[in-house]
Image: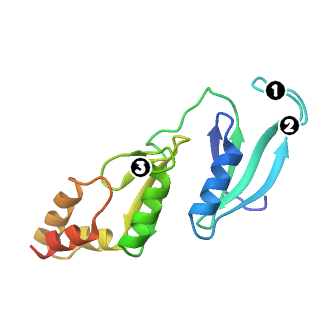
Amino acid sequence: MSDKNTICLWYDSGALEAAQFYAKTFPNSAVGELMYAPGDYPDSKKGALLTVEFTVCGIRCVGINGGPQFKHSEAFSFQILTEDQAETDRLWNAIVGNGGKESECGWCKDKCGLNWQITPRALLAAVKSPDPAAAKRAFESMMTMKKIDIAKIEAARRG
């Protein structure tokens, strides 16, 4: 790992499974080097898979199989920008349809508990509109959604 800054994500024991899921789901994502424990540690033994390097949409990460002490929370999420409804639907359905859970306003959680924001660029454009009334309507529309519906956001923006 050569990057100066890498995101480290703690998993109970499913770091490799998570990395493989992210690599098959998100563009510009891959599983990298695996590191095995050189000695025993509190939650496993020498030779157990300790870490997996991976990228998610070009962002370098390392997953650690650290045990059950720490869980993911909404305090950290990946925000993935989508170009259209088809991409939004594909990513949302991949996460939620594989043991994940829906949340509000484009947020969902994968089966490992990691949080994702599946965010259409059209949503960001609408809530950043130079017309404050249009931005407010788009924002209020988003607040009623789980998965973002771009057509409804654009309709709300237009009034």
Q: Residue at x 30, y 61 (%)?
A: 148
User: Separation of disc 1 and disc 2 at Cα?
Assistant: 8 Å
Res 79 label: none
Q: Position of residue 7 (x, y in %)?
A: 63, 52
Q: Which residue matches tag 3? A: 108
Q: Secondary structure at mark 2?
A: loop
Circle 2/circle 3 CB separation < 8 Å: no
Q: Quadrant of residue 29?
A: bottom right
Q: Is residue 7 visible?
A: no
Horizontal placement of 141 versus 42: left or right? left
Horizontal placement of 91 versus 47: left or right? left
Label 2, residues with CA under 10 Å away: few <14, some 14-19, many ≥20:
some
Q: Residue at x 80, y 40 (%)?
A: 49
Q: Earlier along the polypeptide chain: callout 3 or callout 1?
A: 1
Q: Secondary structure at mark 3?
A: strand
Q: Which residue matches tag 2? A: 37
Circle 3/circle 1 CB separation < 8 Å: no
Label 3, residues with CA under 10 Å away: few <14, some 14-19, many ≥20:
many
Of 39 and 45, which appears nearest the observer? 45
> Which amino acid, mark 1?
Tyr
Look at the image and name its color scheme: rainbow
Q: Which residue matches tag 1? A: 41
Q: Residue at x 50, y 44 (%)?
A: 99
> Which amino acid, mark 3?
Cys
Q: Secondary structure at mark 1?
A: loop
Q: Comparing marks 2 and 3, which lies closer to the viewer?
A: 3
Please determine whether, in this image, residue 122 is positioned above or below residue 76: below
Q: Earlier along the polypeptide chain: callout 2 or callout 3?
A: 2
User: Separation of disc 3 and disc 1 at Cα?
Assistant: 32 Å
Q: Position of residue 107 (x, y in %)?
A: 38, 52
